[in-house]
Structures are given as C-alpha cells and as structure tokens.
Image: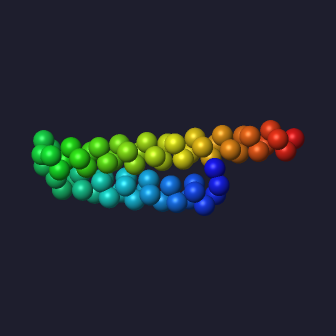
Amino acid sequence: MTPQIGRAALGWATFLVLASGVLLLTLTPGTPEFVVTLFTLCLGLLLGLVVVVGVLLTRRREKREGS
C-alpha cells in the first residue's frame, strides 16, 4: 500500500466515523436516517481497520525483506 493511498483512505475513514458519530447523537433511534448513519459508522470503522492492517502488513513485509 502506497503512503498516499493509505493516508487518503485513513482520512476518509476518519471523516466517516466523526461525521456519522456526531449525527448519531442528533438522530432519533429507529428512524431510517439513524440506520443509514449507523451503517456509515460501521463502514468507516471497517475502512479504518483495513487501512491499519494493510499498513502493518506492509511494514512487516518491508522489514523482512530489508533484513
């Protein structure tokens, strides 16, 4: 994973998590908007997890190849 792609994906993940987290505080549970916002929060968390795992695997691979 190139650093630019990782940085951009992490930026998007952060935006999704923060925006949906703030919106969840203002929405009424049980409404369609609440469900869509909760789904967006889960997608943001999943994207962030994928980026972190990708960075860790890339670092581990580079460390192994450099030794």
* Residue depicted at 63% across the width and 50% down the height: 1
Extreme residue in the right direction: 67
Q: Position of residue 12 (x, y in %)?
A: 44, 57
Q: Position of residue 38 (x, y in %)?
A: 27, 45
Q: How many marks?
A: 0
* Residue depicted at 48% across the width and 47% down the height: 48
* Residue depicted at 78% across the width and 43% down the height: 63
| Colour style of the rendered protein structure | rainbow
Q: Position of residue 3 (x, y in %)?
A: 64, 57
Q: Is residue 6 left or right of residue 11?
A: right
* Residue depicted at 50% across the width and 55% down the height: 9
Q: In the picture, residue 5 is in which quadrant?
A: bottom right
Q: Is residue 55 left or right of residue 13?
A: right
Q: Is residue 2 left or right of residue 18?
A: right
Is the residue 56 above or below the residue 20 in the image? above
Is the residue 35 above or below the residue 19 in the image? above
Q: Is residue 56 left or right of residue 7?
A: right
Return the residue nearer the eye: 22 or 13. 13
The quarter of the picture where the C terminus appears is top right
